[in-house]
Image (cartoon, helix red, strand yellow):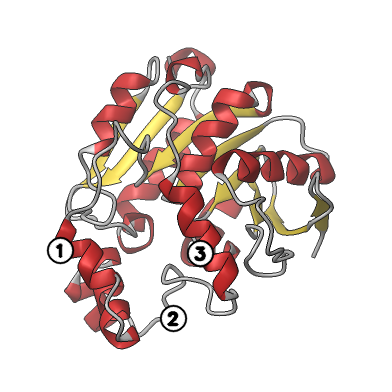
Amino acid sequence: MPHAQAADGAALHYQVRGSGAPLLLLAGQSNNRRWWNPVLDRFAAAFTTVVPDWRGTGGSDRPDTDTYSIENFARDVVSVLDHAGIERAHVYGTSMGGRVAQRLAADHAARVDRLVLGCTSPGAPHGVERGAAVRKALADPDPDVSRAALLDLMYTPEYVATHPGPFHTLGDPTMPAHARRRHLRASARHDAWGALPRITAPTLVVHGTDDDFNPTANAPLLTERIPGARLVLIPGGRHAYFEEFADEATPPVVDFLNARPDTVR
C-alpha cells in the first residue's frame, strides 16, 4: 500500500479502493483506516476511496514530536492527496476525522469538493463537551471497565449482543502511549468556530440522536455555523452510527455526494 511523505518527513500510509469520484474517509481519534472497514465496500462501490492512517497509527510513522494537531493532520491529508494525484476530493470525516475535515475545508478549500461531517464538534469553547460521568468512565484505571464504557458509547447493547466484532472503533491497539496522548491532546485543543463560516464546500452534517460520546447537540451548532449546511440525524444512533446504522446513514451521504451541483446549495 502507498505511503505519502508529510512536510516533516513522516511516512503516511493510506489505502485506495473502488472507482469513481475520489472520496477521502477520515477516521476517529487514536484509530487507523480500519475504522471504516465495516462500510468501506459500500463507499468503494460508488467512489474511489482514499483512507489514510493518521500519524501515530496503522502503517504510518509514529514520531514522538510536537507534530500532532488538527491543523497538522489536515496538512498530512493534503500530502496524501498530493501523493495519490488527487487535486480535489469529497471528504467524509467522523469524530476527530470530522474535526480535521473542518480545518481541511476551511484552510485548504480548493482540495474539498463536498464535505460530510459525522459525529463531530466545532471544539471548545463553543462545542458541547461530553458529561462528567462519561469522562470518568473512560478514564477508569481498569482497562476492562474503560473498554466496556467505550463500547457502550459506540454501539447499542442490542448491536453488541448480536455482533461479535471485531470493533474497529475502539482504538488502534498498536499505538504507542506517546501517540495516544498526542492524539488526545490534539483533539481536545480543536477550535474551528472562527473558521467554520469560511467553509465554501456544500456540507452535510450527520449525527446519531443518542450520541453521548460527542453529544448530538454539536450537530445543529455546526449546521448553523457553516453556510448552507444540511443536517441528517440518525434515530437511535450512538457514536458509531455509521457502522451500526449503515442502512440508514450511508444512503443520504451517497445521495448528497452524487447529487447534481444545483441541488446541494
Residue 82 locus on image (x, y percent): 81, 39
Which residue is identified by label 1? 133
Q: Amino acid at mark 2?
A: Pro
Residue 46 locus on image (x, y percent): 58, 46
* SS state under label 1: helix
Q: Amino acid at mark 3?
A: Arg
Which badge, 3 or 1, comes first in the chain's sequence?
1
Q: Amino acid at mark 1?
A: Ala
Residue 42 locus on image (x, y percent): 51, 56
User: Residue at left 82%, top 60%?
Assistant: 2
Which residue is identified by label 3? 181
User: Residue at left 24%, top 40%?
Assistant: 128
**Residue 34 appears in the picture as rendered:** no
**Residue 7 appears in the picture as rendered:** yes
**Front-most of 81 and 55?**
55
**Front-most of 121 and 240?**
121
**Front-most of 92 and 248?**
92
State the image quarter where residue 122 is shown.
top left
196 sits left or right of 240 in the view: right
Residue 8 locus on image (x, y percent): 81, 48
Which residue is identified by label 2? 166
**Front-most of 195 and 236?**
195
* SS state under label 2: loop
Which badge, 3 or 2, comes first in the chain's sequence?
2
Query: Which quadrant does the N terminus fall into?
Result: bottom right
Query: Which quadrant does the C terminus fall into?
Result: top left
In three-dimensional space, the C-alpha distance between marks 3 and 2, rounded to whole angstroms, equals 24 Å
Residue 121 vertical position relative to residue 32 in the rendered view, above or below: above
